[in-house]
Image (cartoon, helix red, strand yellow):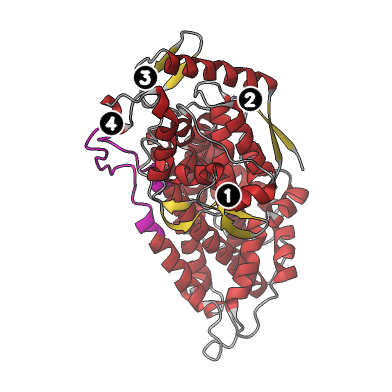
């Protein structure tokens, strides 16, 4: 188990994944502690001096013109949390909740929010002792940040709501007591500091982008196997073709496919058996490459966001100011996650087309639906049905959330991002795409067997062996969902990527 030191400025995507999925421990740097204490003093001074600062000595949203007294400031923060915790739908997965807490800690640790050090340390203890609030996944407009779901995150901290601890869901207060974490009383600015931001959409999206990078690698592997199962023409992968249209993702994809197919006896050259392949093979570098470029763009935006201040108002200790702005607005993430959704949907679209060519005897030259004794056996017929259903569903989900907006808070908040919806849709598309690519890998291995395995490439041979360890060749009908599950697990746990890279070298991204 690793330890992640929170500075507010240096959190990486890999560290987010480590905390979310491997339960890496978290601690606050000494410099971050100093910054937190300094900004907290500014907030206390605002309250003592009765300065008019949004959310500290005023109400929220449309109530920003209502002045709140020093005596009422604690009740104001508590009321903010309990009235904003109105989420809907099933709870977020534990890994996403851990990401939400981690990203909020990192945001507060930058020293621009005015939260108490004790409050941040409470959140760190919750991560390290595995107290996970129950956070419904729906109900955020993505500006003023993820108000509703973040409020559910806070409830157990003040002894309310529900949380999961030691594998059991219980009252938030009980979970905190069992973990030995004292509940807290929020004071001026703290409620707002905890819920005004983009940490929910960014947690969902950060894990999705990490998985998307691995899925792109699996897509290249699946395409390489399909090249071999269909005697694909590798001439179209020649670097000269791609150098004259120098999109980085396209160039990289062509290079990777050649890397995976090196020494293969299953591929062909232009004119050997046909002049050119269908687009789903020939244009793989162009399609995969475009998705890679999109995913790299989104990755860059996520890495900026996880180390950004998304609070309001922002406390500037250097100038003794509390400036009300709009950094909570999720538009940078909303557009990014819509882009991610489209990029992932396209990986699945072209994968399903390659799969269709494999099972269609008129296109593949292989037995119908990749099975001998067709008629008695249906083989992989309905695998393509399922893949087609998933990619069609992705087309609906890929409709951008970020082009929508609806006014809220009596039109004070008159443009919102819908970024959390965008991130959730991207995650769902990723899961569908992963399933489709697992199906292609399974069918390509069957096609290789039926074609007669004359020797696979440096990268594809170990992948084929990894698949055949858990999914034998189909000789007569059996329940295929189990085989698909096993192939999908090989993608999830990165088994095929590791097997491939061990023999063929690292798959760059």
**Contact? badges 1 and 2 (CB < 8 Å):** no
Q: Distance from label 4 to label 2 (Cα)?
A: 34 Å
Which quarter shows the C terminus? top right
- Residue 45 counted in the magenta span: no
> Of 360 and 470, which appears nearest the observer?
470
Direction from residue 506 to residue 95 in the image, left or right: left
Instruction: Identify the element where label 3 is drawn.
Output: loop
Count of marks overlaid on the render: 4
Residue denoted by label 2: 7
From which residue to which does the magenta span run?
Answer: 394-422
Dot placed on the residue nearer the N-terminal end, 4 or 1: 4
Residue under numbered circle 1: 173
Name the N-terminal-most of marks 3 and 4.
3
On the image, the x and y values in percent for residue 180 come to 69, 45
Residue 290: % across, % down: 47, 43
Q: Earlier in the sequence, mark 2 or mark 3?
A: 2
- Taking the view exactly as shown, the residue that stands out farthest to the bottom is 376
Q: CA distance from mark 3 to mark 4?
A: 12 Å
Q: CA distance from mark 2 to mark 3?
A: 27 Å
Foreground tag (1 vs 2)? 1
């Amino acid at each position: 188990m690793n330890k992640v030191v929170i500075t507010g400025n240096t959190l990486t995507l890999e560290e987010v994944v480590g905390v979310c999925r491997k339960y890496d421990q978290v601690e606050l740097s000494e410099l971050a502690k100093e910054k937190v204490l300094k900004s907290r003093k500014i907030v206390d001074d605002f309250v003592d001096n009765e300065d008019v600062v949004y959310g500290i000595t005023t109400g929220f949203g449309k109530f920003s013109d209502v002045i709140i007294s020093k005596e009422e400031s604690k009740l104001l923060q508590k009321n903010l949390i309990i009235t904003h915790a109105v989420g809907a739908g099933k709870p977020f997965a534990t890994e996403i909740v851990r990401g939400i807490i981690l990203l909020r800690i990192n945001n507060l640790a930058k020293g621009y929010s005015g939260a108490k050090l004790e409050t941040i340390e409470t959140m760190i203890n919750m991560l390290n002792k595995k107290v996970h609030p129950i956070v419904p996944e729906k109900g955020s407009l993505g500006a003023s940040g993820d108000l509703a779901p973040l409020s559910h995150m806070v409830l157990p901290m003040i002894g309310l709501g529900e949380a999961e601890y030691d594998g059991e869901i219980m009252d938030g207060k009980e979970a905190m007591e069992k973990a030995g974490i004292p509940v807290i009383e929020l004071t001026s600015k703290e409620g707002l500091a905890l819920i005004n931001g983009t940490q929910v959409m960014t947690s969902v999206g950060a894990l999705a982008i990490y998985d998307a990078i691995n899925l792109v690698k699996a897509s290249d592997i699946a395409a390489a196997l399909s090249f071999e199962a269909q005697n694909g023409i590798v001439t179209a992968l020649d670097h000269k073709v791609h150098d004259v249209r120098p999109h980085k993702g396209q160039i990289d994809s062509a290079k990777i496919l050649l890397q995976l197919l090196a020494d293969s006896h299953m591929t062909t050259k232009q004119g050997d058996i046909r002049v050119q392949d269908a687009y789903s093979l020939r244009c793989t570098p162009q399609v995969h490459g475009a998705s890679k470029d999109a995913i790299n763009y989104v990755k860059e935006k996520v890495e900026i966001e996880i180390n950004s201040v998304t609070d309001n108002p922002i406390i500037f200790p250097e100038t003794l100011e509390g400036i009300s702005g709009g950094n909570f607005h999720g538009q940078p993430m909303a557009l990014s996650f819509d882009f991610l959704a489209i990029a992932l949907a396209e990986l699945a679209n072209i994968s399903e087309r390659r799969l269709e060519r494999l099972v269609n005897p008129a296109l593949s030259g292989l037995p119908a639906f990749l099975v001998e004794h067709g008629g008695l056996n249906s083989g992989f017929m309905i695998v393509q049905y399922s893949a087609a259903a998933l990619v069609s569903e992705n087309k609906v989900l890929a409709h951008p959330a970020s082009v929508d907006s609806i006014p809220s808070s009596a039109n004070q908040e008159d443009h919102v991002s819908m970024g959390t919806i965008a991130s959730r849709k991207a995650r769902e598309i990723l899961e569908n795409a992963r399933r489709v690519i697992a199906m292609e890998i399974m069918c390509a291995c069957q096609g290789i067997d039926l074609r007669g395995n004359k020797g696979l490439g440096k990268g594809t041979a170990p992948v084929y062996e990894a698949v055949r360890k858990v999914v034998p060749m189909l000789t007569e009908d059996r329940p295929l969902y189990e085989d698909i599950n096993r192939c999908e697990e090989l993608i999830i746990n990165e088994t095929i990527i590791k097997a491939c890279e061990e023999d063929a070298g690292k798959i760059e991204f």
